[in-house]
């Protein structure tokens, strides 16, 4: 089903026409591994496979592939239309030639690549999650309103979007999944706040459900 949707969206009759295939499916290692296993039998031998994961291991995704050296991470930072950053993640087997090709593509998209090792949360998600979780804790304890916490980062630190509005855009369920993954890998400092757990349980997931830290008509 994922392959059919992919081909329909990009207007291809066959994914073998692609030189680079970038997946952006849910943050589930098993689903991503299954997709790449399917893709490997459909694309050309020269095609590069890339994941838009924000936290999962590229090396683990490549496990079991016939050609793990062509799998790489391409994490397009949110909000994608206004963010210049693309985080390129090197798996244990990823080759330098794949890195060079993907870096060139990113620059041709008028974005700036950074290269990071295959570590939990990479660089941007790990740093961004710390900020996002602390913003939720501040809201939970009544330090300031969601709007004022966001303004502190937008005006004080020139972030294009505050951490709570960004969490709404990404999805509270996605942020929760990343937090739980990093807590299991890196320790208690990534444990999700009770407010985040409650909002996800109440299906207040942000923009996609119309309500999160903000109302989304």
Image (cartoon, rainbow, N blue to C red):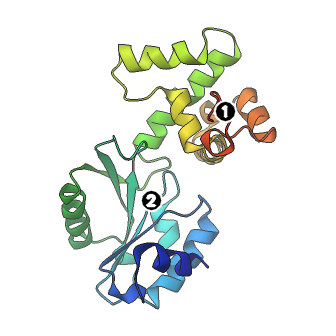
Q: Residue 152: percent from the left, percent from the top? A: 45, 14
Quadrant occupied by the C terminus: top right
Residue at image point 60% right, 65% down: 29
- For the residue pair 160 and 30, the one nearer the viewer reads as 160
For residue 58, say whether it is visible: yes
- Cβ–Cβ under 8 Å for marks 2 and 1: no
**SS for tag 2?**
loop
- Where residue 209 sits, quadrant-wise, is top right
Disc 1 residue crowd, few under 14, some 14–19, many 20+, Cα 10 Å: many
Nearer the observer, disc 2 or disc 1? 1
Query: Disc 2 versus disc 1: distance between alpha carbons?
Result: 24 Å
Q: Residue 101: percent from the left, percent from the top? A: 21, 69
Q: Residue 198: percent from the left, percent from the top? A: 79, 33
Q: Earlier in the sequence, mark 2 or mark 1?
A: 2
Residue reaching furthest to the front? 217
| Relative to 184, residue 137 above or below | above
For residue 64, say whether it is visible: no
Q: Which mark is residue 52?
A: 2
**SS for tag 1?**
loop
Q: Is residue 120 left or right of residue 111?
A: right
- For the residue pair 123 and 32, the one nearer the viewer reads as 32
Disc 2 residue crowd, few under 14, some 14–19, many 20+, Cα 10 Å: many
- For the residue pair 30 and 85, the one nearer the viewer reads as 85
Residue reaching furthest to the top? 143
Q: Which mark is residue 212?
A: 1
| Relative to 167, residue 77 above or below | below
Q: How many marks?
A: 2
- For the residue pair 118 and 4, the one nearer the viewer reads as 4
Residue at image point 77% right, 42% down: 203
Q: Which mark is residue 38?
A: none
């Amino acid at each position: 089903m994922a392959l059919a949707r992919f081909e329909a969206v990009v207007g291809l009759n066959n994914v073998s026409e692609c030189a680079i295939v970038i997946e952006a499916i849910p943050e589930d290692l098993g689903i991503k591994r299954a997709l790449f296993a399917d893709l490997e039998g459909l694309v050309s031998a020269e095609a590069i496979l890339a994941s838009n994961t924000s936290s999962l291991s590229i090396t683990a995704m490549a496990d079991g592939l016939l050609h793990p050296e062509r799998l790489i991470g391409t994490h397009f930072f949110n909000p994608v239309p206004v963010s210049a950053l693309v985080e390129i993640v090197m798996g244990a087997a990823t080759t330098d030639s794949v890195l060079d090709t993907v870096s060139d593509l990113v620059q041709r998209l008028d974005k700036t690549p950074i290269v990071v090792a295959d570590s939990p949360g990479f660089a941007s998600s790990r740093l961004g999650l710390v900020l996002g979780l602390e913003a939720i804790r501040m809201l939970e304890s009544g330090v300031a309103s969601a709007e004022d916490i966001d303004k502190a980062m937008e005006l004080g630190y020139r972030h294009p979007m505050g951490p709570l509005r960004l969490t709404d855009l990404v999805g509270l369920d996605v942020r929760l999944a990343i937090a739980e993954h990093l807590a299991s890998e890196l320790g208690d400092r990534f444990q999700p706040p009770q407010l985040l757990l409650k909002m996800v349980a109440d299906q207040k997931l942000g923009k996609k459900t119309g309500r999160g830290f903000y109302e989304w008509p």
